[in-house]
Amino acid sequence: MQSEEEKIYTVTAVTRLIKYTLEESFPSIWVEGEISNYIHHSSGHRYLSLKDENATIKLTIWRSVGQGLKFEPEDGMKVRAFGDISVYEKGGNYQLNVKRLVPVGVGELEIAFRQLYEKLSKEGLFEPDRKITIPEYPLKVGIVTSPTGAAIRDMIQIGRRRNDAVQLILYPAQVQGKGAELSIIAGIEYFDRRSDIDVIITGRGGGSLEDLWAFNEEALVRAIADCRKPIVTAIGHEIDTTLSDLAADLRAPTPSAAAELVIWDKTAFIEGLKEYLQRLRNALSAMAESKRAELNQLITRPVFKRPETFVREREQYLDNLEKRFAAVGKILFEKQKNGLSLALSRLESLSPLAILKRGYAVIKGFPGGKMIRSISAVNKDETVEALLNDGSLIARVEEINRNKDTR
Amino acid sequence: MSAKKNYKDFESALARLEEVTDKLESGETTLEESIALYTEGMEIAAFCTKVLSEAEKKIAVLKEMNGKFEEVPFEEHEGGEDK
């Protein structure tokens, strides 16, 4: 007979034995540790390890379980996993098949909020340039909220007080619990399709993070961001901020505040209208007044009062013109005269008198003789007159000498 | 200039009223233009007043009937508050 030590198992047999032993001895258990080697496989299953200082255990989250996870596991995250130990025969290893996974220290909703926030802001869903301006004077407001909540009651009260001409239409929606986001999305999409709705408000009264959670669901946040109509959120109290608030065109701190922002004050509007009418009237009377004054001024002009004065004025004007022409003529004449004397002085420089100034003399016969240009025109002892620059000399010809070269 | 224009909403009506008033106040328009502006301003105001003075709007709630939504007067529930 073989001893136990000598018994030979097949791989399958021993693995199966381990499997039974292990799986039987562990009921469903909670394990706490830090996530490492997290892989979200394209099949939808997730594989990860939990570790502490001394040991590691493999975890598997099947797709069906993973779909229910509020947050996406991350390496380094401290979690508690609830599940069954199982042996994977083919791989020869054991693992924990996870049924629930919750974060330690931080709430899973907080983690989910942060993760979805990061994802959607990367996509630009919260960008300010996506925001549509809320109309100043809407006439039809679509409200998506619970028909029995405090939110609708507050908004109706404010609407009645501020402006009964603004119609409020309520889409009764479920605002908390499973599937609440789908109900709210349906309401938003309904109003977005209706062409007569000017602005949409969605929200609810205060509550816990869990109560408000529908407004952090990805589908609803996207529906709000995609809404083509201006949409205002009013969720919980002032301190509550949901991802829906960030995606909305305007975030009101409370439902009452949303109503105050959207429903305009009828009385103030009418006052403003009256002011415009007064300005129009004033402007028109000012215009009429100035036209009347213009007319009066025209009527009192001399031409209408004493036409003959007008004619005389014209005559006088003509006279003036004549005088001015005469004056101009005189000036022109003076100018020409000046021009003449200039010409004269130029002529003078050419005159023989100027030559005399340079030391020459002119000889004439005396008395009253002709200008003598040659010695042949005079005889010895004849009296001649020599004209100089500053006077004349009466002289007698003593001697006549002919130049050798001249005849 | 069409003074008979229908304003699709209060925003555009108000914007036009402001424009008309500023223009008229500028004093740079002819008498005829001024009268036209004044008339238009009055018409806008009348349009706004008419919309506002129409019967008080009842709060409506949507009820789904045969797959279509209908508006029925909203009656507030006194009890059963769930926020």
Image: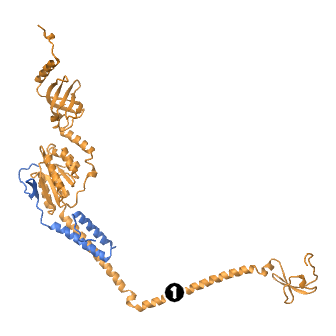
Does A187 sit left or right of A287 as displayed?
Answer: left
Closer-to-camera residue (A130/A310):
A130
- In the figure, A82 relative to A323: above or below? above
Crowd rating for badge 1 (residues with CA inside 10 Å; few <14, some 14–19, many 20+): few
Closer-to-camera residue (A7/A381):
A7
Does B25 sit left or right of A395 as displayed?
Answer: left
**Extreme residue in the bottom direction:** A308
- Occupied quadrant, residue A394: bottom right
The C terminus of chain A lies in which quarter of the figure? bottom right
Q: How is the image coloured?
A: by chain
- Asked if one can make out residue B58 in the rendered structure from this viewpoint, the answer is yes
Q: x%, y% of residue A95? A: 17, 26
Q: x%, y% of residue A288? A: 30, 78
- In the figure, A128 relative to A407: above or below? above
Closer-to-camera residue (B24/A24):
A24
The N terminus of chain A lies in which quarter of the figure? top left
Chain A representation colour: orange
**Extreme residue in the top direction:** A1
- Occupied quadrant, residue B39: bottom left
Q: Residue at x 32, y 76 (%)?
A: B30
Q: Output the letter for the chain in blue.
A: B
Q: x%, y% of residue A380? A: 94, 85
Label 1 sits on what residue type?
Answer: Leu
Q: Which residue is drawn at 65% across and 81% down?
A: A338
Q: x%, y% of residue A319? A: 51, 89
Residue topped by disc 1: A321
Q: Which residue is drawn at 56% across and 87% down?
A: A326
* Tally of marks: 1
User: Mark 1 — on which chain does it sit?
Assistant: A
Q: Dot 1 lies on which element? A: helix
